[in-house]
Image: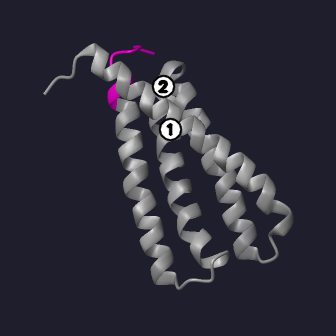
Amino acid sequence: MTLSPPIRRALLVIAALLLLWVAWSGITGGINQLPESRTPGQLAQTITQFAFAFFAASSVVTAFWGTRWNTLMLAGWTLSVTLAAGFASVVWGGTSWFIGLLAGGGALVVGLGIAWLLRVGARGLSRT
């Protein structure tokens, strides 16, 4: 199935806006959490939060420029958002590791969906 250019552009806009919102949320949340990080787990989760913010913004940029790096940026974003979500419920919420795995798994599914939207939306945009 081939999607028409207007549909691909709409998918690209949706994915880019979602990723930019996630980047903003990661930066502001990380800044707020950093002074409150008391345990190594909380610090690790805060670092993964900053990482997913970086990779989210980088994924949007590399969808347009430096497209060779886009797959790597999306993989970094998907991994870091999965880890951040899984760690958050355990180290900040005090839940079990099983719940952390479920939260991370859910974030992985959502992350893969957003990555797919960006890749499909950006397809044919540039050759470099």
Magenta stretch: helix, strand or loop mostly: loop
| Extreme residue in the right direction | 35
What is the number of the mark on residue 55? none
Q: Residue at x 37, y 19 (%)?
A: 9
Q: In the drawing, does residue 43 fall left or right of residue 22?
A: right
Q: Residue at x 81, y 61 (%)?
A: 34
Considering depth in this image, is 32 or 61 the residue closer to the camera? 32
Q: In the drawing, does residue 9 fall left or right of residue 81?
A: left
Q: Are marks 2 and 1 in contact (CB under 8 Å)?
A: no
Residue 48 point in image, percent of width and height: 65, 58
Residue 69 point in image, percent of width and height: 51, 31
Q: In the drawing, does residue 16 fall left or right of residue 124?
A: right
| Extreme residue in the left direction | 1
Classify residue 41 by image quadrant: bottom right
17 w.r.t. 97: above or below: above
The amino acid sitting under disc 2 is Ala
Considering depth in this image, is 12 or 50 the residue closer to the camera? 12
Considering depth in this image, is 18 or 121 the residue closer to the camera? 18
Dot 1 corresponds to which residue? Answer: 18
Q: Residue at x 59, y 62 (%)?
A: 84
Dot 2 corresponds to which residue? Answer: 63
Name the quarter where the N terminus is drawn.
top left
Considering depth in this image, is 20 or 49 the residue closer to the camera? 20
The amino acid sitting under disc 1 is Leu
Classify residue 91 by image quadrant: bottom right
Which residues make up the magenta segment? 120-128
